[in-house]
Amino acid sequence: AEVVVVEDEQAAGELVAGSIVSLIRQKPDAVLGLATGSTPLASYRALASRIAAEAIDVRGVRGFALDEYVGLPVGHPESYRAVITREVVEPLGLTPELVRVPNGDPATIEHAGADYEAAITAAGGVDLQILGIGRTGHIGFNEPGSSLASLTRVKTLTEPTRVDNARFFDSPEDVPMHCITQGIGTILRARHLVLLAFGEAKAEAVAAAVEGGVSASQPGSAIQLHPHATVIVDAAAASRLA
Ligand code: F6R
């Protein structure tokens, strides 16, 4: 992967926004792969500013979120559907029907993974996939042990990930036990991967992803199998790189 060390999240956000703006100018119906969590927020803000300032037509842009919790009530503010609406669709002015999030409704969960894969395929695949990385090394919610060929499916969240995500909920017990996530195989089909990481807490996971052996026990290392992966990190997240 190409590693770019930037000053801070804002600088990373400007870079990511620049790549996405060029993509949309070339392909007005570009397909974006959208991460949630804290990491991509500066990128979404920078992108919203550029779209407004340059009056870029984004009505045809499509999007696929990486993952969703299973079993949260519809409309729960921390469901990734709600987060994507609030942080991406509304500020960027995307067309809501063109932005999909895996369906975490337990009633339809058995075919939700296959449905999502079919939708990504029908859209012609993801052009640019934004990724964060967990302390555990997860990408999407593919925790260590996830097959490098996996497709969208239900997974159990690990305890460290539930603890990390408790900040978004009233109490740690409110963090769902399960999620539905694009698989590592799904992620690897995107045409360009952009993995972002900031802060010392991500340094080990970044080093394992970029320089460690490729292994299911370090899901982030799957980016080494991809021909076009860009890693954008601050100095703290880069601190364990050789
Ligand atoms: C989010 C996702 C996760 C996060 C990761 C980092 O859709 O799939 O892999 O990117 O947990 O989370 P933050 O950015 O909150 O540190």
Image (tube, rainbow, N blue to C red):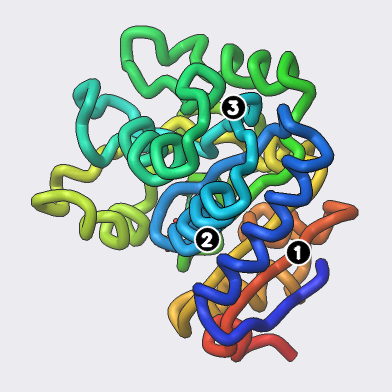
Report, in whole angstroms, how far the alpha carbon at label 2 lies from the one at label 1: 18 Å
Q: Secondary structure at mark 1?
A: strand
User: Residue 64: x, y in percent?
Assistant: 57, 31
Report which residue position mark 1 lands on. Answer: 230
Q: Secondary structure at mark 2?
A: helix
Circle 3: residue type: Arg
Q: Which residue is at 23% across, 44% downward?
A: 175
Q: Which residue is at 51% across, 31% downward?
A: 94
Q: Earlier in the sequence, mark 2 or mark 1?
A: 2
Report which residue position mark 3 lands on. Answer: 59
Above or below, 25 against 63 in this view is: below
User: 224 or 14: which is nearer to us?
Assistant: 14
User: 48 or 19: which is nearer to us?
Assistant: 48
**Placement of the C terminus among the 4 image quadrants:** bottom right
User: Residue 76: x, y in percent?
Assistant: 20, 31
Report, in whole angstroms, how far the alpha carbon at label 2 lies from the one at label 3: 18 Å
Circle 2: residue type: Ala
Give left or right: position of 28 versus 167.
right
Give left or right: position of 165 versus 169.
right
Instruction: Answer few, some or many: residues within 10 Å of disc 1's Cα (few below 14, many 20 plus, some between 14 and 19).
Output: some
Q: Earlier in the sequence, mark 3 or mark 1?
A: 3
User: Residue 80: x, y in percent?
Assistant: 37, 37
Report which residue position mark 2 lands on. Answer: 46
